Amino acid sequence: MAAFAVPLSALAQPAHGIAMYGDPELPPDFAHLRHVNPNAPRGGRIVFGESGGFDSLNPYILRGRAPWGVQTLVHESLMARNWDEPFALYGLLAETVETDSERSWVEFTLREEARFSDGSPVTPEDVLWSFETLAAEGMPRYANAWNRVTRSEVTGPRSVRFHFDRPDRELPLILGLRPVLSRAAWEGRDFARSGMQMPVGSGPYVIESFEAGRNITFRRNPDYWGRDLPINRGQHNLDEIRYEFFADGAVIFEAFKAGEITSFRDGDAARWERGYDFPAARRGDVVRSEIGHSRPSGMAGLVLNARRPPLDDWRVREALIQAFSFEFINETVTGGRLPRITSYFSNAPLAMRPGPAEGRVRALLEPFADTLPPGALEGYALPVSDGSQRNRAGLRRASALLDEAGLVVDAGTLRDASGAPVRLEVLLEQGAGEILAVVEIYGEALRRLGIELRTTVIDPAQYRERIAVYDYDIMFNRWGLSLSPGNEQRLYWGREGVTLPGTRNYAGIDSEAVEHLIEALLNADDQEDFVAHVRALDRVLTAGRHVVPIWFSDRSFIAHRRDLRFPERIPLYGDWIGWQPEVWWWADD
């Protein structure tokens, strides 16, 4: 992680970039990002395979499902992120950014040359309309930030300023990353209604063609206004980016082998070792690249919905964790090649330390001692099984916890105090083949405890509708976490999400300590204080037993056509947002 500057100095004048702490690493006259090839040739194409489908071209609303490429390739924000820094932004649509030392307001000045794909200029009015509309009708995360804005105003022919209800170090950066949409293109249309009308964006690509639910093709815009900006140099090199959608995720690899797809992210470590003995790989037409990273593991696993009994009892959640024979399941599904996620920020300096809380972390947690889950102060670690399917010791511990929680086994069935059998539903989306295998093995273990585990696999549209209103007992989720956690933590774990539809608080976390720690980390004054708050938050979340964690990889496995190339320098975040296809290029041998 980059060092934080202390004390924090005010931006005395409009600047080319902004960082969460201190100054951005790249100077005002930087020529290009460090992890790109500024001389990359342009041309060629890349084809991805995606599971599921899509029924919308508006990625900013709850209704419908839109292809990921629409928000990353077609639309732009005021500023762009450098993924080789923990959290720093540089001007994109905005030429400059200005804020005070406390960050109680921020002002952006647009580039005069900024244009939408229809040739119309990007104006301050477009910015205001976009932010207001996204907050009123878009995903809940947009409203979360906008609620902190007390006043917005056009301050010049190309400038717009936002005032906040209180200082917030991250809020200027969040607004800098909000998509800016064309107000004129949406005139007379209902923004909140899912639809398939071609979007008008300012980004480097336009949609060339699509078949709803089946495929979509993006074509590089030859008239893209920002192609020569330093922030874009070496990026957006491919002429065509295409996504093919498949109902069954297992079919994607077969499509890659057949040449229908040209790049494939392989999440199966066992297949990565043994599954590439096919003609194109033997000829060298397909190569395998392992891409390392320094970002946190994040959290991935079976999410236990505490809104529903008996999952509202931490003892029941701990019992479900004890019953999960990770070592056996990991060996069966991945060949045992991937390490377990041990906390929300594992694999990074932000992760909680083993054993009892000490020093600054303990001081942050002690005021909430009466409400903390067991282990937050004393120390909590995931159980280690004997590696067998039966996992006898784990099941014994699980049975004791269930008994302590008032659940008893009668005639082989676990029942609650009213005598009702304990039945849990796992909700999965079509294409979740690997996770389905995990759940099937896990279900056998829970049956030994008298718990009936039922799996429901539904199409993407139904799945999205149900998770938006938290209609499940258990679901699978991945939270990607960064080296600079901020306001998104409210969306993931904030109390408001217990009842507010559409957040990512899928576990129903309701914690006074979590609320306080999120707010405090947003206003930490230096690196030491910031890290202490994140480690304390990590402790509370992990000890809350909200997820049965699975594994993570400290690298990405990408198989691709040898014609597709990427720079030698890998950014801090590795294979994440903004890397593939953005900095890749096509090179004919």
Image: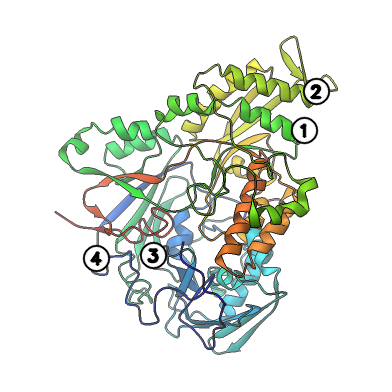
Q: Are marks 1 and 4 in contact (CB under 8 Å)?
A: no
Instruction: Estimate how packed mark 3 is, as few (under 14), some (14 to 19) or many (20 or more) residues with alpha carbons within 10 Å.
Output: many
Name the residue rendered at 78%, 27% in the picture.
405
**How busy is the neighbourhood of tag 2: few (under 14 within 10 Å), some, or many (20 plus)?**
some
Q: Nearer the viewer, mark 1 or mark 4?
A: 1
The x, y position of residue 427, in whole percent, is 61, 34
Q: Dot 2 corresponds to which residue?
A: 416
- Distance from Cα at disc 1 to Cα at disc 4: 56 Å
CA gap, disc 3 and disc 1: 48 Å
Q: Residue furthest front?
A: 359
Mark 2 to mark 3 CA distance (whole Å): 56 Å
Q: Name the residue tied to disc 3.
A: 205
Q: Could you tell whether 556 is left or right of 194 in the image?
A: left
Marking on residue 309: 1
Give x and y (percent) for residue 72. 45, 61
User: N-terminal of the two: label 1 or label 4?
Assistant: 4
- Residue at which label 4 appears: 40
